[in-house]
Every structure is written in structure tokens, then in C-alpha cells.
Image (cartoon, helix red, strand yellow):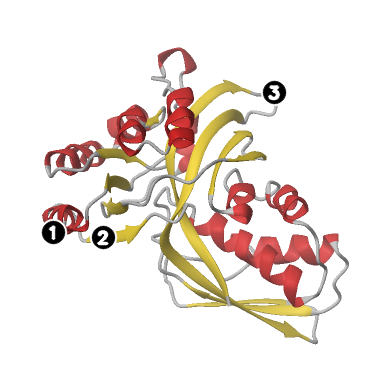
Amino acid sequence: MEKAPAKINLSLDVLHKRDDGYHDVEMVMTTIDLSDRIELQQLSKDEIQIALESRYVPSDERNLAYQAAKLFKKTYQIPNGVRIQIEKNIPVSAGLAGGSTDAAAVLRGLNRLFHVNAPLKDLAKLGSNLGADVAFCVYGKTAIAKGFGDQIEMLPSPPNCWVITARPDIGVSTRTIFERIELQHLQHPDTKKVLEALQKRDFYQICISLGNALEDITFALHPEVNRIKNAMLQAGADGAMMSGSGPTVFGLVQHFSKAQRIYNSMRGFCEDVQLVRILG
């Protein structure tokens, strides 16, 4: 069994467009206690099987977990097949790295299952071929990711706190959001302040330094995401921000009683609301 925790962004910046059409990013991310669970079983036949109960997630080669297994087998010349059982708890297309963290968990799990014993940095390098969040998810915890998300530097974890996530019933395509980026109009977050706040483990400073350069683009396409963020702050969250390209909004709170009140309040805005601890 491999745990695959969701991530939230404490900061997300887009720096410039590269020659290959992708953008260089700078993202401060941390993990939360909302996780998928991955079970891996070795097969004698050379095939990859995906088993999961979700009408929103493909169970073929379009699935990132499948792609991770295929890449791992090819890289380390594994002749055996594998069956991947995925228990989905992280919402799909939500800005919480659900697919990426599953892929990362498959890489870690196969590393153990087939006794390859590759270091995490090698698995992270492998994972960066699959998507911008996979390398971070291989490590988990708290880190800053640069470049295409493949340059990872570990950071101190945030202070213990509660996280309320609220996701409207819409899907947001990361590709669509990035296609609409006009670099000269982006509101860039102050990543340096977020890093300083983490070094000091200053919860209040983290909350007032949160920033996501993609928020305005997603808000323009989906105004309900902005409404949820405002509702989260009005309900008393110490800090709130959209994660990734959305549509999930998260709020940070230190005290459970307040977190519980915000959780109850947000249930009036959308059905998919979670109250979890930060892992980091």
C-alpha cells in the first residue's frame, strides 16, 4: 500500500515561456492529509492493469499511474507486469495533483516491489517526464519547484494547522489556463516572503503571503471560484487561495473549532468540502 497525498500551492508563479512552448514556473507546495491509496501487485504476464472505481478517471494508458508504470518498467528493464489498484479520494481536475501524486506513488511503490532501490532523486527525475507536479509528489512534504517543476528544493514544513478545501462542481483544464497566460498582465506572488515565513515557521506571515499568478485567469473563466475564495475569507479563514490552476480553493486555520465552523459554512457553497490537517 502506497499513500498518495494531495498538494496545495502556497505560492505559484509563472516566469516566462520556453522555446518548447511550456512555461517556467516557481511553485511552493506542501502536502495535506487527503490521500489516494495505491496497491501494487506483481504479474507474471508483461502487462499493466489499472483497477479503480471512478467514472471520471481513465483506466488505460491515458492514466498517469499507467504511464508511470510503463516508464519505470522501461527504464529499469522490468519484464514482469503489474496490477495497480487505485482508491480515489482526491477530486479529479481540482488543482490538488491527484493524477500526479498517483503517478509518484506508483514510482515509489514499484521501486520497492521490484527491489530496484533507486534513490528518490532518480524517481523524481523520471517523474518530471510525466507532468510538472510529479517530481514534487515523489518527495512530498514541503518544497519549492522550479523550471518545468523538475528542480526541487526541500523546505521547512508549515506550522501545524487545519486546511479546508472547497471545490465547485466544475473541471478546469490546466492547459486551457496556461494557453491564456499574458505574462505582462500576471500578478506575481511574493515567493520570497513565503519562503521567509516558512523558515520562521510564521503561520500568520504564510497566510498573508499566499499568492497564485493563475487566479485571475481562472476567476475570469469561472467566477464561482472567486466567490468561494471570498466566502472562505469572510467565514474566517486566516488565509485562502486557489490551488494550482483551480478550481479548488483552500483556507488555512490554526484552531479546530474555527476550522469546523468554516467547514460547515462552506458546505452551503459547494458539496465537495474537506477538512484535513496539513502534512508538509
Residue 62 visible in the picture: no
Dividing the picture into quadrants, the one containing residue 44 is bottom right
Residue at figure coordinates x 66%, y 50% from the top left: 130
What's the distance in space between the residues labelled 3 and 2, CA to CA?
38 Å
Mark-to-mark CA distance, 2 and 1? 12 Å
| CB within 8 Å, label 2 to label 1 | no
| Residue visible at 73% across and 83% down in the picture | 42
How far is disc 1 from disc 3 in space, using C-alphas?
47 Å
Residue drawn at x 41%, y 19% is 186
Residue behind mark 2: 272
Marker disc for residue 19: 3
Q: Nearer the viewer, mark 3 or mark 2?
A: 2
Lower position in the chain sequence, tag 3 or tag 2: 3
Which comes sooner in the sequence, label 2 or label 1? 1
Q: Under tag 1, what secondary structure?
A: helix
Q: Which mark is residue 264?
A: 1
